[in-house]
Amino acid sequence: MSKEDKPVDEHSGIETTGHSWDGISELNNPLPRWWLIVWYISIGIAVIYMILMPAIPALPGLGTNTPGIRNASDRDNVAVAMAELNVERSVSSNALLGASLEEIQTDRDLQQFALAMGESLFGDNCATCHGAGGRGAKGYPVLADDVWLWDGTLDGIETTLRHGIRHEGDDATRFSAMPRFGRDKLLTSQQIDDLTEYVLNFSGRSDDTEAVNRAAPLWSVQCSSCHGENGMGDRTLGAPNLTDTDWLYGGQRDDIYSTIYNARNSHMPAWGDRLDDASIKALAVYVHSLGGGE
Amino acid sequence: MTKTTLKLDRPGGGNSPSHQDLYAKRKQIYPKLAHGKFRTVKWIVMAVTLGVYYAVPWIRWDRGEGIPDQAVIADFASEKFYFFFIEIWPQEAYYLAGLLILASLALFLVTSLLGRVWCGYACPQTVWTDLYIWVERAFEGDRAARMRLDKAPLTFNKLWRKVGKHIVWLIIAFWTGGAFVLYWHDAPTVARGWFSGEAPLSAYWFAGILTLTTYFLAGMMREQVCTYMCPWPRIQGALTDEHALNVTYRYDRGEPRGPKRKSEDWSERGDCIDCDQCVQVCPMGIDIRDGAQLECIHCALCIDACDAMMKRVGRPTGLIAYDTDVAVEARAAKVQPPKYRLIRMRTILYTALIAAIGGLMLFGLSTKATFELNLLKDRSPPFVRLSDGDIQNGYTLKLVNKNTKPRTVSVSVKGPEGLSVKVIGLPHDDASSFEVPVAAHGVDRYRVLVSAPETGKTESLDFAVTDLETGETVTNRVSFMRGGE
């Protein structure tokens, strides 16, 4: 169809686009001119924006993105906003510094602030290992129950947070070392098998009385100094109670064998040099509130 | 860009490629001032709507200590919306949804009864444009004078009239934007702080944006907003029908039209004398005699213009009038026109829906509790096993106190056998009920740990919260999960 004989709508006398849908055709009216002007203005604004603001990304050979003459940086803006926010927060976080953990927990306003602050800090720093809400994972203790390896009191939690567990470079870190009985050839495979039965027997899950009896003297010599004669553990050494149903690394026969063979000496970083005091206190109160605080 | 000439009688149409521009310059419309009952109604509607808009933020309404005393305010600081005696909290945003549903249903109903009456009288674009044209007329005179002035070379007379008009427009625009801001802040405070630079930055921003949009939309864009930008004309076109009262040219009576010669007898011709008055008063620049059109906002000014002419030539008024399509068609076919039917299937339906939703909202608002209990169960972990084998679930208890007085409430928990309850921050006494204070006009959160012996089954817990003073009780049921693994 040549340009000259485009179809024309009979009723209005206006040219149509030539498309027809169920007999309805579209008039080809010109666009209002202000649309065009708005479009030009938009292009103008885009150009001005490119001059003022960072616009063109770092292309090969360019090195960096174009900074724009305003030299604006969202990263810097965030830093400024964070600094402002910290000033705003300092009223409440200073109040945390001036109060004991017990006071924070029983004072309504301080508690609400600490829990909100603790929740967000926990999400950023702790949940990677301990899971959201402290639900835990194999090798990473559940913080919502009442089983604690080291200490479940407010002050105990604060100490753990501040100094970490087996954290190199912190003299006050919580420390103990379980020997690698199998790997370091301290015990034979048979002896470890027997000890495994012995441990299972604490929760009444062994029917091999011979093995249990064989292992008894071994337990007294090798294990009881930390885990106790009755396997009740020792919190000052972070030695878990082996008589309950809570197993950090699994409670099946194979798991226990593997634990005795390889030993378990897990780490937690010391947060004292990464977070400020108010954050540590807020986290302590938050973790304590998760379900098992003592 | 060359000047567009649109001549419809040319072969190939006004837009035939030989003389068509891709973009058409807006044709300035010079609406003439109409006189008559609809113009009067429009002045009154304008005064009332603008009056409401500008005055409402200044109405005070005492609600008590520490709560905004502004009758209508969307208070972002406290996250609440106040409307006289009604107070909407963020948890009740559905009232806002309800209000919008009511508004659209009301529009449906009105459109099916009276066509685009919203567009013609009450739409802010119409009201402000009308106001701006009034200012324009005050500075530059009526239609003919304005057309002359625009054609005239730039003289001092033209300059001061144009500049004066724009200054007044900008003042109105600023006043409009400024009044909008007052709905979001305490009006006297923000108004006082405005000129000393103490008002919040967002207030200046929004006032600035609304000043510009008012100035451009009501001053420059006018009918272009309705024709090109607004979705209502499309939607309302679908909502009106042949039974709705629309501003209609009664062609059955008007045709054949033409200038009336003295010698001519009215019986041999139509009543339309082709005086063009209906076109000259039209703020949309259209000819109502072409029938229903997208551009027509149904402001009825052409009715006033036509009635005035009909009186002058001694014919009955109402050649252009509010009428239904069915009636005009019937008269054109020389049959008895049907009576206007107020009650039709769709009007019944819309009214019923409005009554139902409005009633529901009224019921909700009038029986709204001043006290609420929200329970959030921990999802991670859903439950934990304690060292004694019991199962523990964690909950966040949110106590919403909409009263302006603090309360002391007792919370009791009922559920599985042998449950024990612990509230963080309260002395642990293993009781299944405890007393806590709730701050005035706010939300208090408590973390509650509930434990019970393992049975392997998920059961439900019933929390009941009672205001110790008033005896008001609210309850909430939540699940107590146990794994059973």
Image (tube, rainbow, N blue to C red):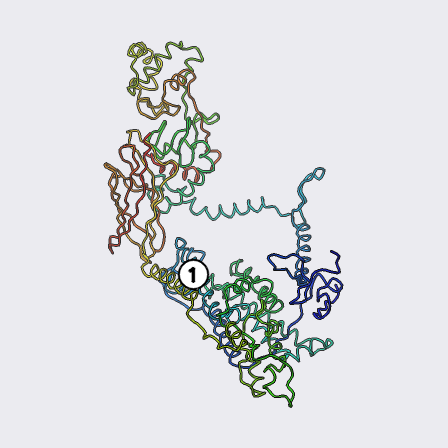
Q: Is mark 1 on a helix, strand or loop?
A: helix
The N terminus of chain B sits in image quarter: bottom right
Q: Residue at x 40, y 9 (%)?
A: A188
Q: B325 above or below A59?
A: below
Task: For mark 1, name the chain.
Answer: B
Q: Position of residue B78 (x, y in %)?
A: 42, 55
Residue with the mark numbered 1? B99
Return the residue nearer the eye: A71 or B150.
B150
Q: Where is residue B419 in the image (x, y as percent from the top left)?
A: 25, 37
Residue A41 image-quadrant placement: bottom right
Q: Which residue is drawn at 43% across and 30% down?
A: A163
Q: Residues within 10 Å of mark 1 (few under 14, many from 20)?
A: some
Q: Residue furthest bottom?
A: B263
Return the residue nearer the eye: B352 or B440.
B352
Return the residue nearer the eye: B183 or B28.
B28
In-image side of A245 versus B115 (left or right):
left
Return the residue nearer the eye: B19 or B99.
B19
Q: Position of residue B420 (x, y in %)?
A: 26, 38
Q: A141 above or below B60?
A: above
The C terminus of chain B sits in image quarter: top left
Residue B74 image-quadrant placement: bottom left
The mark tally for this picture is: 1
Report the amino acid beneath label 1.
Answer: Leu
Q: B83 above or below B410?
A: below
Q: Position of residue A93 (x, y in %)?
A: 43, 44
